[in-house]
């Protein structure tokens, strides 16, 4: 497959390994899961994010509040719990907790590339509430966390990783965290297996 056709099938997504995972020395485990999916690492850096960067990542706008807060609100309702807040109020509280949690701690930012990279990144991460995450996903395999526990402790939920939720979200997040020259364009030998059909034939057959 020529490079132009191959690039049409590729997506890029941001996946960040959060401070709690770095403290637990799980970086290698998570990278291994993404590599085994077939995704290619094209950018990576360890940062100590500023408040301004985190606030850009979790935007101060009604659309983000409604989208994020509705998921949290519905999780409480599914468990028969009254959160005592509207979805937007929940999201504003969550945003403040996330800023407090991430600023000044190490955060590993990664750019992963491949067909369906955004969807595969999300599936590999698992549901945001680890109690609902499938076994085999990062959160399903490595977390005992829940919204209820984090609320009781008054901190952000330890969701272990961040994975972009859509192509548009991935593009916006990559622009926040990476300069164009920090994302590399290179070939993996294994890509012949993924993107061509005339490979690995027995000689003479």
Image (cartoon, grey):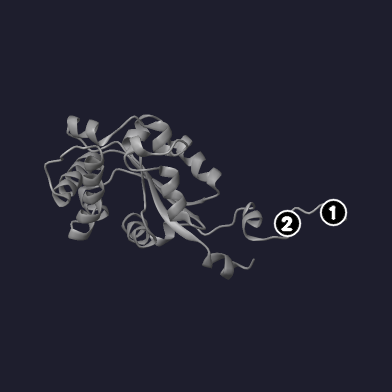
Where residue 148 appears, x then y in whole percent? Answer: 23, 33
Quadrant in the picture for residue 149: top left
Q: Residues within 10 Å of mark 2 (few under 14, many from 20)?
A: few
**Could you say whether the residue bearing mark 1 is in a helix, strand or loop?**
loop
Residue sitting nearer the eye, 8 or 152: 152
- In the image, what residue occupies the spot 24% across and 46% down? 74
Report whether 169 appears left or right of 154: right
Q: Give the labeled residue for mark 1.
A: 203
User: Is residue 17 placed above or below 5 in the rendered structure?
Assistant: above
Residue 134, picture quadrant:
top left
Residue 70 seen in the current view: yes
User: Real-space Cα distance between discs 2 and 1?
Assistant: 11 Å
Residue at (28, 34) in percent of width and height: 146
Q: Quadrant of the N terminus?
A: bottom right
Q: Which residue is mark 2?
A: 199
* Residue 110: x %, y % from top left: 42, 48
Q: Does residue 45 appear to the left or right of 7 in the view shown?
A: left
Contact (CB < 8 A) between labels 2 and 1?
Answer: no
């Amino acid at each position: 497959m020529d490079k132009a056709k191959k690039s049409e099938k590729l997506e890029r997504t941001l996946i960040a390994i959060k401070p709690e995972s770095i403290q637990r020395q799980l970086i290698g485990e998570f990278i291994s899961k993404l590599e085994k999916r077939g995704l290619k690492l094209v950018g990576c850096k360890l940062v100590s994010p500023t408040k301004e960067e985190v606030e850009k990542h979790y935007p101060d706008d009604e659309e983000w509040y409604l989208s994020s807060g509705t998921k949290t609100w519905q999780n409480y309702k599914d468990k028969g719990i009254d959160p005592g807040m509207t979805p937007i109020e929940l999201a504003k509280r969550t945003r403040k907790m996330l800023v407090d949690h991430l600023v000044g701690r190490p955060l590993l930012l990664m750019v992963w590339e491949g067909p369906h990279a955004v969807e595969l990144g999300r599936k590999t991460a698992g549901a945001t509430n680890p109690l609902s995450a499938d076994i085999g996903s990062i959160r399903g395999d490595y977390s005992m966390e829940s919204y209820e526990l984090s609320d009781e402790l008054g901190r952000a939920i330890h969701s272990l990783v961040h994975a972009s939720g859509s192509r548009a979200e991935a593009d916006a997040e990559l622009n926040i965290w990476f300069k164009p020259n920090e994302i590399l364009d290179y070939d993996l030998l294994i890509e012949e297996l993924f993107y061509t059909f005339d490979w690995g034939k027995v000689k003479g057959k």
